[in-house]
Image (tube, rainbow, N blue to C red):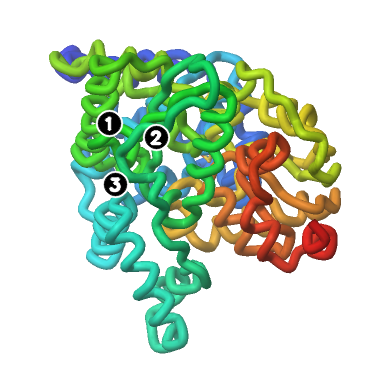
Amino acid sequence: MQTNFSLTNLADSNMAQSEQILRKCVHCGFCTATCPTYLLLGDELDSPRGRIYLIKDMLENNRPADAKTVKHVDRCLSCLSCMTTCPSGVHYMHLVDHARTHIEKTFQRPMPDRILRNLLAFVLPRPMLFRLSLVAARLAKPFKQLCPKRIAGLLDMAPANIPSPSAHDAPQSFAARGQRKMRVALMTGCAQKVLDPKINEATIRILTRYGVEVVVAPGAGCCGALTHHMGKADASHAAAAANIRAWRGEMKLSGLDRVVINTSGCGTTVKDYGFMFRDDPVLAQDAATISEIACDVSELLSELDLKPTGDTPRLKVGYHSACSMQHGQKITKLPMDLLRSAGFEILAIPEGHICCGSAGTYNLLQPDLANQLRDRKIKNIESVAPQIIATGNIGCMVQIASGTQTPVVHTVELLDWATGGPIPQSLKSEAGNIGEFISHR
Ligand code: SF4
Ligand code: SF4
């Protein structure tokens, strides 16, 4: 694609980067076929190619974002399916991230939108506040008819059960069992440890069982993705910088072989820290190192020669590959291979490349589109009749679980169970289609 950025404009490294990305696009439109919003809306401006044109026009002229551009960029899930499809290697993720930052700086959203976005950006990355707001939402649920539609929708999403915090998430070190093979930092995250603290517990259990010392570093927290996807660059960089400093501290103290992440949405962001901080005179080198050693928990588990006990039932698992896992990190077969080797039967889900509609805060900010995608995803999953659904991203777990009776678990919980850990909580407590079987165990 021909571009026409001024030299002054190109002096900004983000502009220069976006210009390089734009030049790679050859307008072929292959990406439209796999874009969830184009599939739903059929509008070129809701396709990757259409958004690329809008973003080009906005950045090239370095003009403030207009309502039309904001509407179509806001509707983008950042699912990155278009990056998997694109034959020209267009790095849509960095382009849309830049567009979102530009929008945030130059566009005045209507007051209710601003309040909602600022509230989410402030509350979600802070576990204590998030927990309190979930409790408040649960109490307010019976009165939702009195609330505006958007607020009522948010109240609907509050889970019925809010688990107690886990002692595992406090800064500490968990010794490896037997001979230590490596030392890793676990990113315990923010929203996940409030919504389902058992995931971190299962991760620590299985890793230490296989000789990995796991440290929860003091000072590490939210990866910054939630605010990053809202274009709030200062907040996302502050969160990322805190993690980089925390893990650098651990590296200097006793060495770190990996930073392990069990939420693929966060993994995509941490693996991008090197790019985010490329111009930072202080943190660039450390950020690049962290990105190099960052891995999804499934990547690390595949190195550990797991030994299933053989005691777990051969359940039919519908594996949902989160967009951030398959498109963001290009991890596709690995989690399924691990589950298969652990004794589960893996069912292929139709339209597996299409987003479930969770996408960070997307289901809160674009509930209509998100619900359509969720319903479509669940229809596809249920068409293969799994006994359980497994995935590696808490956002997808919550989104899918909100529309099906089939229990939804994290991949690592199943692998932990199959190698000597306890049955995942949701299989014990949910009245799903395997409830009877589980109750006998
Ligand atoms: S597939 Fe790639 S090159 Fe083709 S229009 Fe989409 S982004 Fe551009
Ligand atoms: S990131 Fe997803 S929703 Fe956004 S343009 Fe690409 S395919 Fe479409």
- Mark 1 sits near ligand 2, with its Cβ under 8 Å away: no
For marks 3 and 2 on the same chain, the one whose residue lies earlier in the sequence = 3
Which mark is first along the chain, 3 or 1?
A: 3
Q: Residues within 10 Å of mark 2 (few under 14, many from 20)?
A: many
Residue 81 picture quarter? top right
Q: Nearer the viewer, residue 160 or 198?
A: 198
Residue pointed to by mark 1: 243
Q: Position of residue 190 (x, y in %)?
A: 36, 47
Q: Residue at horizontal 33%, vertical 60%?
A: 130
Which residue lies under the disc numbered 2? 187
Q: Is residue 380 left or right of residue 272?
A: right
Disc 2 vs disc 1: Cβ atoms closer than 8 Å?
A: yes
Label 1 packing within 10 angstroms: few (<14), some (14-19), many (20+): many
Is label 3 within 8 A of ligand 2 (CB to nearest ligand atom)? no
Q: Quadrant of the C terminus?
A: bottom right
- Do tag 1 and tag 3 residues touch (Cβ < 8 Å)? no
Asked if residue 107 is positioned above or below residue 157 in the image, the reply reads above
Residue 73 percent location from the top left of the image: 41, 43
Residue where numbered disc 3 is placed: 66
* Secondary element at tag 2: strand
